[in-house]
Image (cartoon, grey):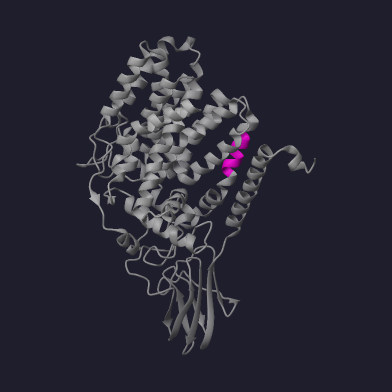
Amino acid sequence: MKKDLLVILLLLILSIPALYELFIPGGFTSHDLTHHVIRQVSMDKLISDGQFPPRWSDDLNQGYGYPVFLFNYPLPALIGEGFHKMGLNFVDSVKAVLFLGLVLGVPGMYLFLKQLLKDDWVAVLGAMFFLYAPLRFLNTYVSAAVGSALAMGIVPWVFLFILRISKGDRWAPILGGITLAFLILAHNVTTLIFFPVFLAFAGFLAWKNKKGILVMLALGLGLSAWFWIPAIIEKQYIKFDSIFNNFYQDQFPNIQQLIYSPWGYGLSHPMNPESGDMSYQIGLVHLLVILVYGIWFIVYGRKSKNRALGIFVLGTFLLSIFMMTKLSLPLWDNLPVLALVQFPLRFEALTIFAASLASGLLLTHLPYKKATFFVLLVLVLYANRNHWHINKVFDPGDLYYQSLRTTSTTYSEHLPKWGSVRDKLSPGKFEFIRGNGNITLDIDKSNYVLANIEATDSGTLRFNQYYFPDWQIRIDNNLVKFNYLSDSESYGLPIFDVEKGKHKIEARFINTKTRNLADLISLITLTVCVTMILWMLLPRHMLLGKR
């Protein structure tokens, strides 16, 4: 353990070039950093309002609200909220999560490869290959894709616990289940991409303890059910499918672009390149180790003790290349679930993982191990020397981000089908569209509004939050029916009649049956998980009430 801690410390020192520019004060230009800071500001309000699980943001979309965290992976913003409560501003809280995404995978990959291949040198090299890859810097410094960045840091830990399950570690199913839940909550798309590979790894190498694997899967899916079940079932109510149904069709890079494409900070147009576009390259050194290991495996692999692992590594690599190129278009067209991935380039996460394992496997078989180690380490650092940089500093200050009321994605795909992007700030939670009166808000929270209304005559009120199941409105404690589908008056916002006089009006965002069921599943799973932990930690006589 002491030796491992020293090696991990060394790895963190070697990681400094990859992390350094995250310490430059302020934000930076990128695809998504502003979106994530806006989301972080919203998460702070939702948690302060006592909304948990956080689902509905009332301030975004110009104050007309939408269910941002019902469909957007919540873990990055939840972790960011922890950093914010520790004193970081909103921008630095998001950057801290990007930092965590880069650094978390380093000890995870080291420990995984050490236990898999029983060699410190191999484990160190594989961990560095996993960190120093163009895709990791694309996620961090070009896209600022906080969910993808954090998920990549979690992935090696999932593989580690699958491996530990195969070795009979009694803690591994629990820790693996918790880690899998973190991965789902960090980035559901990365989980979707890696899930078949997790199962393949278990099948090739770790299916010696089927019960342990099943426990891990059950705990992971159960603990995160509060997010993924409503996200799947209630996706029918949002614009996502109409926007992204065929989005992937012009996003396939070609083989030449995967081998090399210039490093840029622009957007993704692989089939119609524009000047300054982002790069699609896997990394020349990563491709080199895969190529050399593949040749070695063809010649000598049949007699290798790591034959099954070699098949797994090369199979994962070939699968990722296939899924990123247009050869796989028929599969994308016929498997609707792939539309969730949006960008075929996201399968490069599998490529980087496979290349990192290949670097370790190659080192175990080549002569002059220490010399080869240093050569490959220097090469992978040198090859990525231009990738670990931001483009430009953009530091308007926290107040700027707190003043933004846009949606938190480029395409506003999580708006209700009957909603639209608003360009003017909402005049308030309630307004008269017919008649007149005074409106005073007693309580104004993200999921609960209490107002005193004094109507000078009978009229019609509009509740300026987009309807989404299940907003409920009560007048003087009586549930009222409202309309939200009249384009001429409601624009997707609930409208209802109110009589002359003084009234108390409540609007509350409550759980649907789906959300209640999902929350219950997660609560039951959490109870089971805690019980299992206590069962293993506490002496049996304490648990059984015996002396």
> Which percent across, then down, holds residue 465?
45, 68
Question: What segment carries the magenta color?
Answer: 214-221
> Which percent across, then down, holds residue 233?
54, 52
Residue 216 part of the magenta-drawn span? yes
Residue at figure coordinates x 65%, y 48% from the top left: 527
Seen from the viewer's position, the closer of residues 175 and 223 is 175
The C terminus is located in which quarter?
A: top right
> Which percent across, then down, holds residue 421?
36, 62
Seen from the viewer's position, the closer of residues 406 and 240 is 406
Seen from the viewer's position, the closer of residues 244 and 151 is 151
Tag count: 0
415 up-or-down from 372: above or below: below
56 up-or-down from 154: above or below: below
> Which percent across, then down, holds residue 526?
62, 47
172 up-or-down from 37: above or below: above
Magenta stretch prevailing secondary structure: helix
Residue at figure coordinates x 38%, y 33% from the top left: 12
